[in-house]
Amino acid sequence: LYTSSSDDWPGYSLDLFTYPEHYHEDIESVYIPHGVIMDRIERLARHIVDDIGDHDIVVLCVLKGGYKFCSDLVEFIKVLGRNSNTYLETRVEFIRLKSYLNDQSTEDLHIIGSRDLSFLRGKVCLKKRAIVDTGKTMKALLKHVETFQPKMVKVYFRDLNHICVISEIGKVKYKV
């Protein structure tokens, strides 16, 4: 994912954080630290529980990047349920999408894995995604999901651990 910022803030210095040493040349700075992200996921779980009420939830996790976020969010939802004596049945299903080549969004959306999402019919569906850039991929997925007539659809996203600025070396290294 490539993003640009309208201001000149370079992000937090890498000296303030721990990160795997093998990424040393691949990242320039940290935009959003992991602790802030975890606090936000916990708050997001509270919003979801408030929005959903006592409905069972089907979580549609967009792999691969959405897995950790999905796991953290589902765990926070379960903790909130336990602490309020409310049981929310939470089922997690996985889907993979491909709409990028390197850091460029393409016009094509490929759903990898099951295209049959009929298990969503009449259910409350949460979609989790690691990142949202142009929104084209999410719009196409939402259109596909709606054909299966879920009761309600909510979309949530984030990236892990810290949100960092990728260096030029990192862009070359991870290019497909």
Image (tube, grey):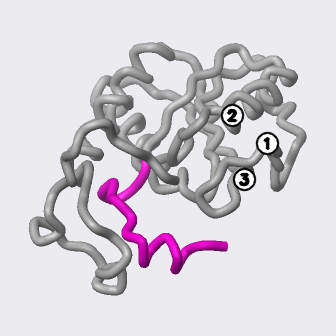
Mark 2 — residue? 136
Total tally of numbered discs in the picture: 3
State the residue in front, 45 or 4: 4
State the residue in front, 152 or 132: 132
Taking the spot 24% from the left edge, 62% from the top edge, the residue there is: 29
Q: Position of residue 115 (x, y in %)?
A: 88, 43
Determine contact: label 2, label 3, CB under 8 Å: no
Q: Distance between the residues labelled 1 and 2?
A: 8 Å
* 122 over 171 or under it: above or below: above
* 89 over 26 or under it: above or below: above
**Magenta region: which residues?**
159-176
Disc number placed over residue 96 in the picture, else none: 3
User: Which comes sooner in the sequence, label 2 or label 3?
Assistant: 3
Quarter of the image for the C terminus: give it.
bottom right
State the residue in front, 162 or 5: 5
User: Which comes sooner in the sequence, label 1 or label 2?
Assistant: 1
Determine contact: label 1, label 2, CB under 8 Å: yes
Amino acid identity at mark 3: Arg
Q: Distance between the residues labelled 3 and 1?
A: 16 Å
Q: Position of residue 42 (x, y in %)?
A: 30, 36
Taking the spot 26% from the left edge, 51% from the top edge, the residue there is: 31
Q: Is mark 2 on a helix, strand or loop?
A: helix
Q: How far apart are marks 2 and 3 (CA)?
A: 15 Å
Q: Residues within 10 Å of mark 2 (few under 14, many from 20)?
A: some
